[in-house]
Image (cartoon, grey):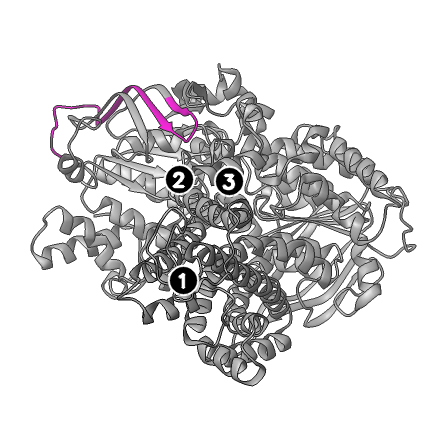
Amino acid sequence: MSEISRVPSTQTLALLPARDSSYWRRALRSRSLVVGASWILLVGLSALTLPLVLQLDPYSVAPTQRLQGPSLEHLAGTDSYGRDVFARLLSGALTSLRVGLIVCLVTAVAGSIIGVLAAFNSVLDQILMRICDGLMAIPGILLAVSLAAALGPTISNLIIALAIVYTPGLARVVRSRALAVRSDTFVEASRVQGARPVHIMVRHILPNTFSITAVQATFIFAESVITEAALSFLGAGVQQPLASWGNMLNQGKDVIMQAPQIVVFTSLFLVLTVLALNLLGDGLRDTVDSRGVRPQPRRARSSRKRPPRDATARAIEPEGTQL
Amino acid sequence: MTAMALSTPLTMSRLGIDVDTRDTRLELVSDVTLEVGEREILALVGESGSGKTLTARAALGLFPPHAHTSGAINLHGTEVLTASAAELRSLRGKDAAMIFQEPSTALNPVFRVGWQIEEGLRAHGVAPRAERKRIALDMLRAVGIPEPETRYDYYPHQFSGGQKQRIVIAAALALRPSVIIADEPTTALDVTVQAEILDLLRQCRESFGAAIVLITHNMGVVADLADRVAVMYQGRIVEQAPVDELFATPRHPYAQRLLAAVPSLGASTGSDDAPQPPRAQPQAASGLPDPGGSPAVAASGLSVSFATGWRKPRFAAVDDVSFEISHGEVLGLVGESGSGKSTIGRAIAGLAPVSAGSLVVLGGDISRTRGAVRRALRRKVGYVFQDPATSFNPFLTVEESVAEPLLIHRAAPNARARTARVLELLDAVQLSRGMASRRPYELSGGQRQRVGIARALALGPSLLVADEPTSALDVSVQAKVLDIFQELQRELQFACLFISHDLAVVELLADRIAVLQRGALVEIGSAADVIQRPTAAYTRALIGAVPLPDPVAQRARRAAALTRADPHPPSKPHLI
């Protein structure tokens, strides 16, 4: 791949790989994206498979084996009921990832719809954005605690509370992107052809907001994991005996002198997972945003032209060859 | 002003610039050898991507990131490629200065222009404040800015585009550099302003003794200003010759093609009337029913105005304009930027509101209809946009983009029929069928614009609005696109409003030409009449300002203009 190639040659351009594969390769080149995604996959897969393989049960109580240290039998020791901490860590991981994933998906879908609709109709824009402003004023934990108090502390109430809190932020981001895309010429071109608003929204605006939604949703994933842990720690989230990193920390703090490994391992998992999610989001942003730090071999020659989206070698235009 | 011993301020020998990309190393410039003599204007021409800007910037030691250089550049006795950062700093501005293409972005909007002219002086240690201000005022006066004492404290937004370019030139001249690198200095400007800036550059050479490296793709500008021309193609200089020699007998095939592709004003009506067949009987050639007798577009007293703010007068972009376009006729619409020519095109397509008067398009009033009637009307109107880079959704393939109108109007019974139609359209604009699965950013500007034409023609429109379809393209690419356009128009006989700022392009295509000035129609008539025998003074000024792509003729015209007293007295610079 390192041979010197003449610049504006159609042959060279034709030989370049298609964009789809280069998207993949760009993603794989981003170290933070690969590291973050690997950790999340590792945790998720272990939580799904290891309990079956190793015959781990997060709920089996063994009063004789309370607060033991790490051993071959119990990799991360046992808690004050004699339950295997490693099994509970994995089970808690499943809870956290499930809550995070559902919140991030719900938020992404709802936020995209609200954002695109708001960008399209000025009346709707005022209504939706004022509602969003109102919701953004409510602290997430407070809303979740009150929902838990009113409807009972279940996982689904937790998901509802988090989705309500995070949707407005995403909707705003999508709206601003949609407004920018709406003023692009290709939207006008579609309008001149007689396209209905729904057609423009679905076919032109929505796909162009995907990249920003994906990045934003990843960060919401990370925040949801933290908030879920905080709420469970406070007792307003996932309840015992179901395992969650939050309620494990709560329980572990009472016995921190006798069995510090409970708090240490749980915190470690929580921190690493949130870090991985943030890395994933950062990497995703670098991949999606073509104005990153990548070398751009060609100077912009006309200010009226935007730099091409994919400013790799293929962007060099072989205009001279088609005379 | 120093180092008198050197007669050639700038020499490059076997310059090569390679840039590392992720996968490969690109050779952007190779084996460039050129000399710029004292007081010489050397034009570097070539199309975008040919390396002319890279070459010229290299003289200042400005390289793109991840660049590797070879060869040697000698600027006033300094080896640029091996110079230290401090040496380069002292050389920039003092020995060689740069004039940029887009004056509105070359000036910082938050600083006063006087301060910006003095910036270089401060950097080069011209210490006394009063001295700096004196030089700045002299420079402003020299480039023809009226009342420099007052204007010294103005901000860039208070100047017009042409004046901003004068200020950029003033800043470049402040340290009396022996070499000025002008990177497309007039591309962003209107023709009349361009003529003034070219005059100013000529005076830079005559009064300041500066050598100029002029980067341009406009052969008219080359003919007007340059002494010598270097033609660049694919990163190499393929031909270097004095300007008269190059225009008379270009040797390299690329230089020949380049010159052949330049549309020349007054050429198509002068020598060859034959290839333009009369297009008087175009009725019912396209498959769509023509409402008998009535023109394709009839505008009478058309006005378009925009709200500028609460309780402020509305801005009239188009004011009381009346014209007609018959079926099968091409009406060229010319005017400078801000003359409202694009607004008229947008009004015809229903993108801009009609505030007064009437605009009947294909028998319907597009601005006052809604819903299904409006959609039916839009089905018969195609639109080609100016900027091919933004007029396609990057998520759609070429095929999907071209098929979109078919999809919107359910004009094809099934997906297979749509694909067939798309391939037919790609054939019509001479793109290979393999392009169908590509995405817009994988195509060159010219190819993209051809896809734009294919999309506009997808439904067989009886009217096409082309809004500066070639202004973002290189000359040679433009020639190809115009060729295809002309051929399709002859074949399909659609009526067309062709908007352009380039008189030569409009003359090539249009049956009739309308000239707009500040929203008002100045002149309308047959193409030959408007170009050969313009009646309005504005049209004459517009035609007179276009530099002819022929150095001998252009020189003769300039001499004639000088004896006839200067047509732009306020812009005549008073040089010190």
Residue A64, numbered label: 1
Q: Neighbour class for label 1 at 10 Å: few (<14), some, many (≥20)?
A: few
Between A311 and A38, the one lying in front of the other is A38
The verdict on residue B6 being magenta is yes
Q: Are marks 3 and 1 on the same chain?
A: yes
Q: Is residue B217 above or below residue A38?
A: above
Left or right position of B148 against B242: left
What chain is tagged by disc 1?
A
> From which residue to which does the magenta span run?
B1-29
Of the numbered discs 1 and 2, the one sitting upstream in the chain is 1
Q: Secondary structure at mark 1?
A: helix
Q: Are marks 1 and 2 on the same chain?
A: yes
- Which residue is under mark 3? A310
Of the numbered discs 2 and 3, the one sitting upstream in the chain is 2
Of the numbered discs 3 and 1, the one sitting upstream in the chain is 1
Q: CA distance from mark 2 to mark 3?
A: 11 Å
- Which residue is under mark 2? A294
